[in-house]
Image (tube, helix red, strand yellow):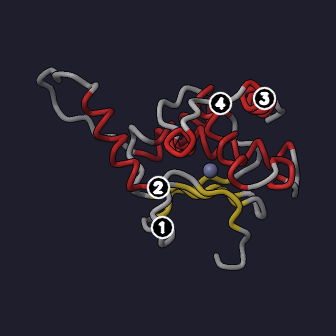
Amino acid sequence: MSTRAIVAVLLALVTLVTLGAIATSHTGPRAASLPTVCDPAVVMNHRLDELGRSGYAWEIQPDPIDNEHHAGYTYFDPPLVVVSGKVTCEQMPTVVNHEWMHVQQARAFPGQVVLAYGGMDEVEIIADCGSMLLGSAYTPYLTQRRQQTGDHGCTADENWSARELINHPR
Ligand SMILES: [Zn+2]
C-alpha cells in the first residue's frame, strides 16, 4: 500500500460518529419490529449502481485502513476506492458520494487532479460540493472551512466545477 500514491482522503471516522448521532436523532420513534440487518457492502453497491463505477474497483477493508481513521481513500493508479469497514449503512451513501467525486476528478483531469484545483484543499472542497449536490447532508471539508473562515457552503465557481464533474462521462 505504501507504494501507491494516496491522492484523496475523506471523512475522519471521529467525525462520522457525530453523523451517526445526528442520523439517529432524526430517526424518531421506531415501530416495534424485528431488527433489520444491514450490510454496508450492499448499500455501497446500490449507490454505485446509481452513480456508476467508472472503471474503479470499490472495496471495503477492515478498519483501520490507516492511522488517521479515514473513512475512505481513492487511489488513482491503479483505480481503486477503499472504504473503511467502520462505515455504517447510514454513513455509506455520503462516503460513496464524496469518493465518487474524486473518481470523477481523476477522469476529468488524468494525472493532474491536484494541479487542476490548485491544491489538495480545493480537491476536497470540490468533492464535498459535489457530494452535497448528490444529496449528502454531511460535508466535513465544508464544515471545516466554515469553522475556519466563516464561509458557508460552496461558491458559484465551486458548484459549477462540481456539476461539471457530475455531468462528466462515467
Ligand atoms: Zn476526499
Near mark 3 (Cα within 10 A), the count class, few <14, some 14-19 or many ≥20, is few
**Image marks 4 and 1: residues in contact by CB distance under 8 Å:** no
- Say whether disc 2 or disc 4 marks the residue closer to the N-terminus: 2
Q: Please give the label number shown on residue 12.
A: 2
**Badge 1 density bin: few <14, some 14–19, many ≥20, Cα 10 Å:** few
Q: Secondary structure at mark 3?
A: helix
- Residue type, label 4: Cys
Residue underneath mark 3: 157
Tags 1 and 2 touching, CB below 8 Å: yes
CA separation, marks 4 and 1? 26 Å
Residue type at mark 2? Ala
Task: State whether residue 150 is above or below residue 69.
Answer: above
Tell me: is circle 1 under 8 Å from ligand 1: no
Pointer 4: residues within 10 angstroms few (<14), some, or many (20+)? some
Query: Percent from the top left, x then y, of residue 65?
Result: 50, 67
Q: Tell me residue 121's x, y (percent).
A: 68, 51
Pick whichever of labels 1 and 3 is earlier in the sequence.
1
Identify residue for label 4: 154
